[in-house]
Amino acid sequence: MAGNRTFTMLKPDAVTAGNIGAITKMIEEAGFKIVAMKKTRLSSELAGKFYEVHKARPFYGELCSYMSSGAIVPMILEKDNAVEDFRTLIGATDPKKAAPGTIRALFAKSIDANAIHGSDSDANAEIESNFFFSQFERF
Ligand code: UDP
Ligand code: MG
């Protein structure tokens, strides 16, 4: 059975462009409850840990420096079928391929600076939530 929580992170391009409010509004209007949220910044080393699964991919180095280039806003979200529904809400990785009306179609600048992260499985949602939030910040 699909779980009811997912993890997301507004990326530096979205934060720098002043889109925290607009994107968060879309998330809430789509029926997601914000369980935890903060504004923070990753070192390149921590970004590397977060994206460890992509270590072998050619864009890994640039991804780590990009993700540590500015503030980010990680969040834990709650809704039925959260992981799948949230991936639908954000759209494809490449904003040129993202469905109209999705967060990436509206706010992403490029395939790397693509505004927002969304977990791809319940297991990864749990791992990624634990990466940023202690048990006392999740209720
Ligand atoms: N990415 C990139 N170039 C690519 C593919 C991905 O820079 O060709 C970046 C992009 O920021 C993406 C992240 O790496 O969001 C993780 O890639 P993944 O394939 O997991 O995409 P996502 O799950 O974020 O849609
Ligand atoms: Mg992914």
Image: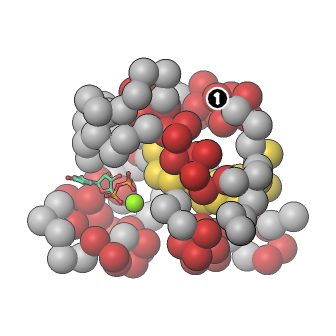
Q: Is residue 83 left or right of residue 76?
A: left
Q: Is residue 109 left or right of residue 105?
A: left
Location of mark 1 (residue):
26
**Measured from the top left, where is residue 70 in percent x and y?**
40, 49
Position of 33 relative to 109 (above/below) = below
Around disc 1, counting alpha carbons within 10 Å, would you say few (fewer than 14), some (14 to 19), or many (20 or more)?
Answer: some
SS at badge 1? helix
* Residue drawn at the location 36% of the way across and 70% of the way down: 51
* Residue drawn at the location 64% of the way across and 29% of the way down: 26
**Measured from the top left, where is residue 49 in percent x and y?**
39, 78
Task: Please state, as top left, top right, bottom left or bottom right, where the C terminus lies in the image.
Answer: bottom right
Front-most of 26 and 48?
Answer: 26
Q: Quadrant of ligand 1?
A: bottom left
Task: Please state, as top left, top right, bottom left or bottom right, where the N terminus lies in the image.
Answer: bottom right
**Measured from the top left, where is residue 115 in percent x and y?**
42, 39
The outermost residue toward the right is 139
**Measured from the top left, where is residue 47 in percent x and y?**
38, 68
The outermost residue toward the front is 1
Q: Amino acid at mark 1?
A: Met
